Amino acid sequence: MPKNHRSAVVCVALWLACALPALAQEGFKKIQDRVTEHTLKNGLKLIILERHEVPTVSFQTYVDTGSVNETRGITGMAHMFEHMAFKGTPVIGSKDYAKEKAALERLDSTYEKYRAERLKGDKADPNKLKELEAAFKSAQEEASKYVDSDRFGKTISQAGGQGLNAFTQADSTQYFYSLPSNKLELWMLLESERFLRPVLRDFYKERDVVMEERRMRTESQPIGKLIEEVLSIGFKAHAYKEPTIGHMSDLQTLSRTEAEDFLRKHYVASNMVIAIVGDVDPKEVIRLAETYFGRLPKVPKPDPIHTVEPPQVGERRVTIYEQSQPIYVAAYHKPAASDKDDVVFDVMQDILSQGRTSRLYRGLVRDKKIVSFAGGFNNFPGEKYPNMFLLFGITAPGHTNAEVEQAIDAEIERLKNEPIDDPTLRAVKTRAKAGLIRQLNSNSGLAFQLVNAEGKLGNWRQLFTQLDKINAVTAADIQRVARQYFTRNNRVVGVLEPVQKSAEQNEEKR
Amino acid sequence: MKKSISIKIILLVLMLLSISEALAQKTAQGPATGRAAQPPADPKQLKYPRLRDWKVPEPVRVELSNGMVVYMLEDHELPVINMSALVRTGGRWDPADKGGLASIAASVMRTGGTTSKTGDQLDDELERIAAAVETSADNTSGSTSMSVLKEDLDTGLRILADVLMNPAFREDKIELEKIQHRDAIARRNDDIQEITDREFQKLVYGPTSPYARNEEYRTIDNITREDLIAFHKRYYHPNNVIAGVWGDFTIDEMRAKLESYFGKWQRTRLDVPPLPQVNYQPGGRVFFISKENVNQSNVAVGHLGGKQSDPDYFLLLTLNRVLGERFFVNIRDKQGLAYSVFANWNAGFDAPGYFFMGGQTKSESTVKFIKTLLAEIDKLSKEQVSDEELMRAKDSILNSFIFNFDTTGKVIGRLLRYEYFGYPKDFLLQYKQRVEKVTQADLLRVAKEHLRPEKFAFLVAGRDKDFDAPLGSLGLGEVAKVDIAIPEPKAAPVAAATAESAAKGKALLQAARKATGGEALDAVKDIVLKADAKLITPQGEFAIKNETTIKYPNKILNKLALPFGEVLQVYDGQVAWAKTPQGTRELSSDDAVEFQNAIAADIVFLLTHLDAPGYQAQFLEQADVDGRRANVVLVKTPNEHAIKVYLDADTGMVLRESRLSKAGGAPADAEENYSDYREVSGVRLPFKRTAKRNGQPFAEVTITEIKVNTGVTDQVFVKQ
């Protein structure tokens, strides 16, 4: 009898525990049922999700190319091209395309000559260089005369477009905005034309803009400098080592012709996934997509990257001295997001840094008071290829990076040595479910999630099946993965020390 | 269950239809080639269907029995419920010496737990169910929010109500919150954009204005648990709260729950202070912040603006669109001068906002960039915008109007803000109606009236040795350097002097005495300083004339020429008194002590009393004073007044003094910086002094004349 009684209680408890995820699962299923998939003959994939609450629609174009697809000497090209994709077409953005085209051809040839002379460096003939530069500048001004600036952006803005933008990552390049839903065809026209017949006008001026972006994000930002250094020593073979924004000297040398080559190779239909979420009729979407995007040629996907980062054989460290308060970063090599163990890193990220019950918060912020903030971050700087799990601490005034390093190391050892208790693991799983639910309330957010799951993990349904994977993670998995990857030889440490300290240290050495 | 099946069937039908229609199109349009006709390449050729009719969701407004206002909106798409509330309070009401109070108090309401649960227990309970209850305050309001999965609504409401009604303000969490604030202070000069935004606001509102001032280590240190309790008691009452709740519930159910969780909360007579006034004119036009580790300048240009209730506000927003578009095309696209270039008509709800334009450009194009911004403003206030520009600005506002309603959270949030700041519910609709009627003449008029280049303040942060031209070449007067040094925390208790530190302190002061004039100092019996001073006050900057006479060892007279007449402040060695146009009065004994202390800090007095009985000196540390290395010596006077003296490590001269001053009543950290030393009667004295109070610039003094041994009589100091 007592035995039976006990088992009944367990049953009820279990039923409660299972029932809640089951309810959510049904909600997730309903959303998945509203998705229509369609692949055009040229290989372009469409994911359409109907949400009829408000007459708006959000678009997200995922291009499966990023800075990792660049080769030596053209770093920054993927991002540079992303900027050029806003410059219009022969029809959009030109005052007289026939003349503009001729002017752009002249610009290309004068730039090639100017660049060739400039690349001679010390051996360049200064007079000739001046002459060629003048010719280039004048060709540039000539071509500019025919430009109807930002016509592409103005057209979207006038139509009521919202959130027009794009970004380039190591793994991908993504373009997005939203429109009132009656303007669906406008998006079809603009988005297909920008990749079918882009005109790379004002290239060299936009290159200046990108250099300003580099100065702003990296060169004038202490933390930007630190991250660039950590990546550069974190990878020695794989292109994740390169900054997505590009090296300044490469930016100064990129040409319009190289950008067109990059476009032809990577901006092909088979390399694109598009998500359309909102108040649309999927049938109408597919009909228009066939008409507009069906025009993109059928070209095979570019070859995958074959370079594999070799195992790291010893700890790597970098210290930068800056006019800034101290920051500590440690990164451990780990497999790509497609690996079965990736989800274990997601769980560890939650345990370490999600909220005020997380271990880094309680250990370092609340109890030791040595950081004002600390966190973990999975899949850095990208997820398609083996990457890193990043940990960071924003060192509190009066404390040192060395203290933070020691405390974070202690938390890492805890993950290896103590099994996670059940309530902690259950809370992680509950938060994963709730987190997913909360992501489902905006068209643009959903479009982003769908193309990323499809583009990087191969299937948009991964957005939902990820939950099952998290639910399957055990305490033993966490210990196993922590022990396997969180080793000293496998890590890269970056520290930012205030500049005064370095001066003092130098003095001590003298 | 049934619903999901029916959706599936519909989807299937739609898919089949779409295939057949695509096929039909092919046969219809391209029998010869089998290919569809080319679609248009020009957007002008497209015709759009009318946007389908759509009803703006209308939240229900209820007032609970205790006066708490709640807007409610059902949204059954996801099993989630959110609540957010505004409380009439904010950092702008923080006492000047407790900057950071509202922010700290509001945060610790949640993190410090309630009378029955610690903050950690609340964290455990909420995070286990992936829920959140948070409280915070910014400058103009307090905010509280809750987000729960539907099934956890009761837990969320119970905790939210407990946090609002019964916060316990446990000390450990107060200290933790203070650490976060101190960290933010320590890091506030790390990022050049943050520096520029912050300092620009100070130029617009004044450095000590509640709309722009900084939190400092000292103001954080001053905040006590009692302050937090008093803060909660003053502001957190149901009739001072406007809340909104939206998500998967029914109105009736929610209303009953709110009454049950918040009903016990008693309404009270409110005591919210009036709004701080905004009224400031900066003392110059061009300001510069030196930042060595960057290769790009941050530029901010603008002036004080208006409120959203200004009848021209909607026109200014429209105008700002045109300006923003011109900046993007003319400065970014055509010249490649910036990645980020912007213009903002930043209007406040209940206090003046500011117009603000700028961006980032490489150091070598700084002045060119500023001139380009100005040229655009000039054009905007001289010529009407084009038909096309007007049309595009209007269309883009009107066509994107729907996005103001695309989430229930946006709809509710807007209504809360409107009611909180006393704006009409249909304010957004008024915007639409005004924009529909806007003309080119309207825009030209508001450009002329509201954009006033002659009032612009210019702030540049960057590395000036790389600039294309000096900022002075803008022709807008002298370039003022903005000091962004972070004031030190309140002096930590100083370690007791050791024989060694005392000896070193004494030796350093002796060296300073020698460098300043040695025995010539002993010959100084009185001194008269005439000066032009600039006072920096919350009301603005004032230029005044000042004359100070000191008769050593204990008499001082300070004569100030103020706009409303002459003021004397005098200490005759026993009594302190003041004379104003209103008459003469004796000052308090505290003021007398303050005069004694001020004399003790006088360089001549200090360096002639090194061996006087009761004076102690102690070497503390080395420090940086505006790029010079300094030895810091702590001097204590016989009446226990402590003066930190910063002596130039190379020349021995006094660079800075800091001490606690009680001038004007409240104790304040007073810092004086000395430069431009010149010789007068064998003594080297500073002709330039800059003063700070509590880390804020307070006065800049240029001494025009120093006379020594004028033979001033005691009679001059006697009360008239």
Image (tube, coloured by chain):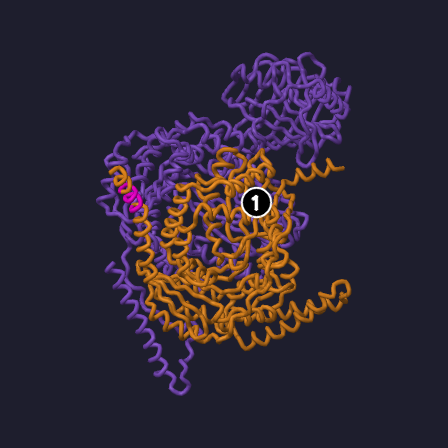
Snapshot quadrant of residue B698: top right
Mark 1: amino acid: Asp
Which image quadrant: the N terminus of chain B? bottom left
B516 lies above or below A436: above
Q: Is residue A10 magenta?
A: yes
In this rendered view, identify the residue nearer to me: A139 or A18.
Answer: A18
Question: Mark 1 = which residue?
Answer: B191
- Overall secondary structure of the magenta stretch? helix
Q: Is residue A358 magenta?
A: no
Residue A49 visible in the shown view: yes
| Residue B706 located left or right of residue B96 | right
Chain in orange?
A: A
B570 lies above or below A18: above
A134 lies above or below B206: below
Residue B366 visible in the shown view: no
In this rendered view, identify the residue nearer to me: B296 or B378.
Answer: B296
- Magenta span: A8-15
Q: Farthest bottom residue?
A: B32
Q: Position of residue A311 (x, y in %)?
A: 61, 55
Q: Position of residue A371 (x, y in %)?
A: 53, 37
Q: Position of residue B678 (x, y in %)?
A: 74, 30
Which image quadrant: the C terminus of chain B? top right
For image coordinates 53% across by 60% down, the residue present is A171
The chain letter under disc 1 is B
- The tally of labels here is 1
Chain in purple?
A: B
In this rendered view, identify the residue nearer to me: B562 or B34.
Answer: B34
B124 lies above or below B639: below
For image coordinates 55% across by 25% down, the residue present is B668
In this rendered view, identify the residue nearer to me: A343 or A278.
Answer: A343
